[in-house]
Image (spheres, rainbow, N blue to C red):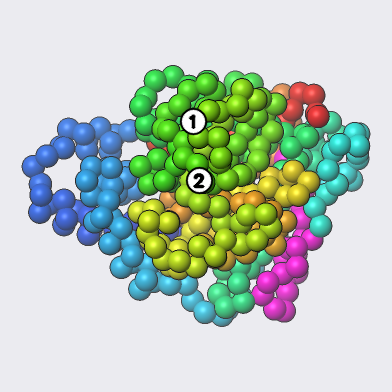
Amino acid sequence: MPIATATQRRKRHSLAYRRVRAIAVAGVAMGAGYGGVGMVGALSAPGSASLGVKFVEWVRGNGGAGIVQTAENIWYQTHQPAVGGEPPKGSLRPVASVRQSHTLTSSKILPPPRAITPIASPPLPHEGQWTPEGPLVDGSPALYVTLMRPDKIHTSLVAGVAWMDPHLVSFLQYAGAQEPPGGGAWPYMAPIQGPQASNLIAAFNSGFRMSDAQGGYYAYGRMAVPLKNGAASFVVNAQGTATVERWTHGQDVPSSIKVVRQNLVPIVQSGNINPAVYSSNYQVWGATVGNQVLVWRSGVGVTSNGAIVYVSGPGLSVGSLARLLQRAGAVNAMELDINSAWTNFFYFNHTLGVSASPANGYRLVYNMERPPQRYFEGTARDFVAVVARKNPL
């Protein structure tokens, strides 16, 4: 079965949002008569999101979160992924351009990740095998990616896993036009440009809208949303090194920490999957489609030796996302965003010093909806940029 074209993918993945939009329109129409100017502004906001996605986001942020939640649940529960089958031909093999051997120039640089044992059986060629991607940093690959099926039942689906060496890359938190809330200038704001574009290795989505994240947002000395103890947190220190942890510092952010982006509760903690991933309590998982409905999901974790791993794919529950992150070596992990419009990981095969661009950008998973240009233009949501270090640690 051939891999779908970009046009086919966009049509298929936007179908869910069209259904959600239709139900949301009906709900908004019942209480119509307010917010027209704000809606026009939201629909005309910059970025590659479709009008349907922008409309749903506007409804969600203007008193219609319950409507959108109901619509999403109805749609996804009646359109779950097929059982059985095989992935499209070629979908388990990433685009590879870095074929040099891993040359350790420092004892601190991590060894390449070990192959991941496939979940589905029998394993298919290339499944769980890592491929170096992106430009070499100090003579070594800083990024490895692999693709694999996420469970034993939905065997036509493909999830992507990315592994990043913190000794070779640093992590920057970018603000979007609407997230975090409050407006104003941030040190890093979409689009990616300048030195960051010249040293770009990858970029990936952050978590839920802050109104749904059940946590806070702190970046570069500014508190946009108060932090919450116990929340799963993507934390970046002054050296640009990232980790994932359960937050315990309240509002007293240590001076060594530059970014704390929270989202829900940990899904992996100290190597163990949090039993809460099997709970459908919306007080735990926020105003989303819940944890058991199989949808596009993304997550990030940290391994025992400090590598950052990112996972995303279609047809994932919170539990299957947690299992993938654990299998990739994560000892602490958190869910990021969900739904096909927001789960993106792009990597860039270019020469350092020459700006990365959509032309040399690639999706981690072949059927991710949004194109690599997303973070090179205005975008509503915050995100993370991964850049090469000038002086590897």
Q: Residue at x 42, y 56 (%)?
A: 285
Which disc is residue 251 wearing? 1
Q: Position of residue 354 (x, y in %)?
A: 69, 26
Residue 14 sits in quarter: bottom left
Left or right position of 22 against 11: left
- Expressed as whole percent of the image width and height from the top left, the position of residue 344 reads 53, 47
SS at mark 1 in the image: loop
Quadrant location of the C terminus in the rendered image: top right
- Please name whichever residue, 354 or 181, is drawn nearer the observer in this view of the structure: 181
Residue 372 seen in the current view: no
* Residue 128 belongs to magenta span: yes
Q: Quadrant of residue 170?
A: top right
Q: Is residue 150 left or right of residue 381?
A: right
Q: What separation in Å lies between label 2 and label 1 (alpha carbons)?
A: 12 Å
* Callout 2 secondary element: loop
* Residue type, mark 2 in image: Ala
* Quadrant (top left, top right, bottom left, bottom right) of the N terminus: bottom right
Under mark 1, the amino acid is: Gln
Q: Does residue 104 show up?
A: yes
- Percent x, y for residue 28? 16, 51
Note whether 329 is above or below 358 in the view shown. below
The magenta segment is 115-134
The residue beneath circle 2 is 231
